[in-house]
Image: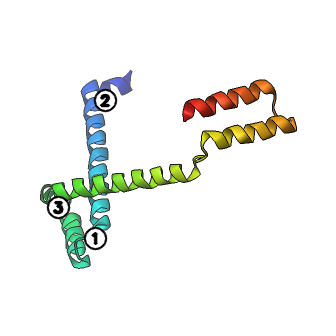
Amino acid sequence: MIVATSYPFLEIFWTMLIFFAFIVWIWILITVLADLFRRHDTSGFMKVLWIIFIIVLPYLGVFVYLIAEHKGMTERAVKQQNDAKAQFDQYVQSVAAKSDPTEQIAKAKQMLDSGTISQSEFEQIKQRALTSA
């Protein structure tokens, strides 16, 4: 019982609030630094100046960067997401089957003739090929 009275509920709540605020701060700092290093429209010298500003005055530096570069950060993030989506879509198209229904039915017929599949399986493959067309 001594532990419960020496650390009341409001102290626990305050500690949790400070902890999560620190986590949010780290997240914002990493986001800003990641955006800064990904930029191709600024020189290395300007990046160094931003980093020094963020190290010397961390809160002010990050908040000034967010205010000054918020539109550019958004545009770069959207561009990166679109590039990743396009790359994923290209990958999916490259590995997806690109055969038309007649090829699928012909392959299934060969498998039926060789005895690999049964007549009912052939009919299922044929039905799927015709419905996906």
Looking at the rendered structure, the kind of residue marked 3 is: Gly
Q: Position of residue 25 (x, y in %)?
A: 26, 49
At 81% from the left and 34% from the top, the residue drawn is: 112
Looking at the rendered structure, the kind of residue marked 2 is: Tyr
Report if residue 66 is visible in the image: no
Label 1 belongs to which residue? 40
Considering the numbered disc 2 on the image, is that residue within a helix, a strand or a loop? loop
Q: Position of residue 14 (x, y in %)?
A: 25, 34
Which residue occupies the foreground of this view, 57 or 105? 105
From the image, state whether disc 3 or disc 1 is nearer to you.
1
Relative vertical location of residue 24 with respect to residue 7 in this rendering, above or below: below
Residue contact between numbered discs 3 and 2, judged by CB atoms under 8 Å: no
Label 2 belongs to which residue? 7
Q: Which badge, 3 or 2, comes first in the chain's sequence?
A: 2
Q: Which badge, 2 or 1, comes first in the chain's sequence?
A: 2
At 57% from the left and 29% from the top, the residue drawn is: 131
Relative vertical location of residue 73 with respect to residue 113 in this rendering, above or below: below
Report if residue 132 is visible in the image: yes
Relative vertical location of residue 47 with respect to residue 13 in this rendering, above or below: below
Quadrant of residue 13 within the rendered picture: top left
Quadrant of residue 29 within the rendered picture: bottom left
From the image, state whether disc 2 or disc 1 is nearer to you.
1
From the image, state whether disc 3 or disc 2 is nearer to you.
3
Considering the numbered disc 1 on the image, is that residue within a helix, a strand or a loop? loop
Label 3 belongs to which residue? 61
* Outermost right residue: 115
